Amino acid sequence: MADSPAWLASESAPADGPRQVSGAGGGAAQGTLSRTDPEDTTEWGPTVRVGFRCFHLGAATMMLAAAAVSFTLGNGPEFSEASVALYTFLFGLIFGIFELTRIYPISFTEIYFLNNFGFLFTHSLKAIFIIFVSFAVLGLNGKKNNDVEIWPQVSTCIVVCGDGFALLVATFYCPQWFPSERPEIIDPTKPGANKV
């Protein structure tokens, strides 16, 4: 390896090595999650990812607040309004918890998200999910005593949709900033598995 150029040696050796997270909890996939911190060849990549992560958490909070306010307005929500508010609340909760697990990985939540919402680990699919969910906010109850107040729903939809659209554009414009965050599940029963 001494005869190879320095740039080749720096690309082949991982900076920090894989981070092991022990798996616990139920689910189809149990074992150990191996997450490698994504290497970045640019200096802007980590900053952009952290910025998007903060913006995602803000958008999820806006969705949760808009859904909670929808329950309190008017004379009580009808069934259709309550179901839209419930779905918006659940989408915001899933989105917020997923982004929190990107900051502080918890093994059983990562296994849960990997089994049920694996598309969230791919940034372009996560952006499409955010855009899709943003339009559910428009179905929330925005009336208080039959007065029309739709600006909270419209502003939340604009912010969340803008978040998803910006992530989609950034993912296609600079894909090196957004490596896959999908953890590998290591089965401890197979030979050669790294046991923690």
Image (tube, helix red, strand yellow):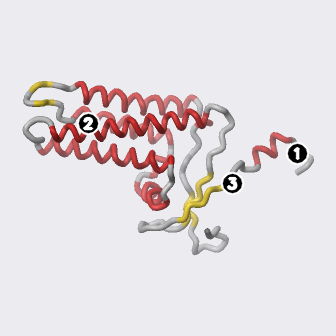
| Image position, residue 111 (x, y; %) | 47, 60
Give the spatial CA distance, label 3 vs label 2.
Answer: 41 Å
| Image position, residue 113 (x, y; %) | 43, 54
Q: Amino acid at mark 1?
A: Ser
Relative to 183, say whether 127 is above or below.
above
Q: Amino acid at mark 2?
A: Ala
Say the numbered circle drawn on residue 137.
none
Q: Amino acid at mark 3?
A: Gly
Residue assigned mark 3:
17
What residue is at 17 percent from the left and 35 percent from the top?
A: 141
Horizontal placement of 162 versus 123: left or right? left
Circle 2: element type: helix
Instruction: Using a 10 Å C-alpha cutoff, classify the residue at mark 1 as few (fewer than 14 neighbours), some (14 to 19) or many (20 or more).
Output: few
Q: Earlier in the sequence, mark 1 or mark 3?
A: 1
For discs 2 and 1, the disc positioned in front in the rendered view: 2
Q: Earlier in the sequence, mark 2 or mark 1?
A: 1
Give the spatial CA distance, label 1 vs label 3.
Answer: 21 Å
Say the numbered circle drawn on residue 4.
1
Circle 3: element type: loop
What residue is at 76 percent from the left and 50 percent from the top?
A: 13
Q: Nearer the viewer, residue 166 or 124?
A: 166
Circles 2 and 1: CB atoms closer than 8 Å:
no
What residue is at 27 percent from the left and 27 percent from the top?
A: 154
Quadrant in the picture for the C terminus: bottom right
Residue assigned mark 2:
66
Q: Quadrant of residue 11?
A: top right
Give the spatial CA distance, label 2 vs label 1.
Answer: 57 Å
Relative to 33, say whether 76 is above or below.
above
* Image label count: 3
Determine the residue located farthest toward the right in the rendered image. Answer: 3
